[in-house]
Amino acid sequence: MATRVHGRPLAYLDNAATTHRPRAVLDAMDGFSRTSNANVHRGVHRLSQVATDAFEAARETVRISIGASEAAEVVFTKGCTEAINLVAQSWGTANLREGDEVLLSTMEHHANIVPWQVVAKATGARIRPIPIHDDGTLDLSALDTMLGPKTRLVGIAHVSNSLGTINPVEEVARLARSAGAKVLVDGAQALAHLPVDVRALGVDFYAMSGHKMYGPMGVGGLYARRELLEEMPPYQTGGGMIRTVTFEETTYAGVPDRFEPGTPNVAGVIGWAAAFEFLAGLDRKAVQHHEDDLLALASELIGSQPGVHVLGPIPSSRAAVVSFVMDGIHPHDIGTVLDQEGVAIRAGHHCCMPLMARLGVSGTARASLALYNTGEEVHALAKGLARVREVMT
Ligand code: PMP
């Protein structure tokens, strides 16, 4: 990477927080802003039509990329957080009743916990955490026992942002649906690493984030099956989502417009679609191979250091994340010393406080990899950890 920090070439290993964007994404956004900038769905004039066509073409790109049946099943949001809030507020408020249960895995990001807590409080529903094993994998048999007539929804991360655990979403969806429950998958960390086919996975809702998969910040989306969207009330309201308005009454537009009030992030949506196209243009098997090699190398180089403990499952059940703790050294100190060495990692609870509590740590140091990372950068991290020990002990 050309960027230098503290006089050293930056090894950016914080890709689970956000990824960098390829030229194709930057060019797509820039091209829209320079030549086609107009508001969508409102104008009769030519430029507005061009912008609308580009916006809807982006929706179709997302649809194809995730295997949805139709473009109307893709709702654009400002990110994964907003997508989950949409489901919780709209579907949750309309469907949850006193005594109903929402099952969420212990490794969920706060974005897939707090929105459900808010709705649970308002409806009298109950949130029950699905346990995990000590190695950070989901306890499927516990889930099986927890599922019952009161279960209305199971929420699960496709890939854990803290540990990299790849969850068996297809199996979770099968179990949940046979109990009559809906399944929401937090896909924020999956799309950069795994091909995703929402129909093959058998899920009802799949929440996505642009900036975790080489796209821009402030954009993402929700996949939801049409029949669910059709029944869901609006989440946010305003212009662009109505059919008719009088001061007495408003009728709403169909899907997905009903869930997209206001001016959307059109350049962002176009950039996000370009990120999907960028990934589709790569040999995904080769990318996966590269990331697996880096992950194995990082796990080995980090895990073999004295006093260092890697958390989470074995690398083959993990996607591109190495979360670790060092005896007697706070994760923030690890991150600070590594920064001085030009290595960017994340330190803290990673917005997964219940998971940290389950693992018995206040936080971890987390290196997260992307397709552009190199073995050299992983070696820089390992070298940096030796420096951490030197400085901190
Ligand atoms: N879920 C997971 C697993 C995440 O890692 C993140 C981002 N840290 C989010 C949800 C939130 O995504 P966004 O930034 O798109 O709102």
Image: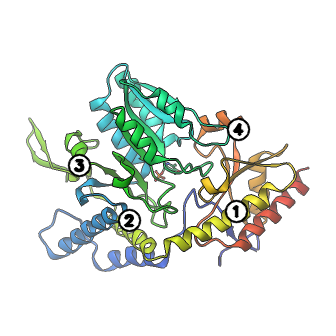
Looking at the rendered image, the disc whose residue lies closer to the viewer, 3 or 1, is 1
Q: Residues within 10 Å of mark 3 (few under 14, many from 20)?
A: some
Q: Residues within 10 Å of mark 1 (few under 14, many from 20)?
A: some
Q: Which residue is mark 3?
A: 226
Looking at the rendered image, the disc whose residue lies closer to the viewer, 3 or 4, is 3
Foreground residue, 219 or 177?
177
Amino acid type at circle 2 is: Gly
Residue 108 visible in this rendered orientation of the protein? yes
In this picture, residue 382 sits left or right of residue 265 = right
Q: CA distance from mark 4 to mark 1?
A: 25 Å
Q: Position of residue 17 (x, y in %)?
A: 57, 56
Q: CA distance from mark 2 to mark 4?
A: 35 Å
Query: Which of the labelled discs sits on residue 391, or is there none?
Result: none
Q: Which residue is mark 1?
A: 296
Does ligand 1 reach within 8 Å of label 1's beta carbon?
A: no
Residue placed at 59% from the left, 36% from the top?
A: 132
Name the element at disc 2. helix
Q: CA distance from mark 3 to mark 4?
A: 41 Å
Instruction: First in sequence, mark 3 or 4: give its number.
Output: 3
Amino acid type at circle 1 is: Ala
Residue placed at 27% from the left, 48% from the top?
A: 225
Instruction: First in sequence, mark 2 or 4: give its number.
Output: 2
Amino acid type at circle 3 is: Arg
Foreground residue, 168 or 272?
168
Q: Is residue 134 above or below residue 6?
A: above
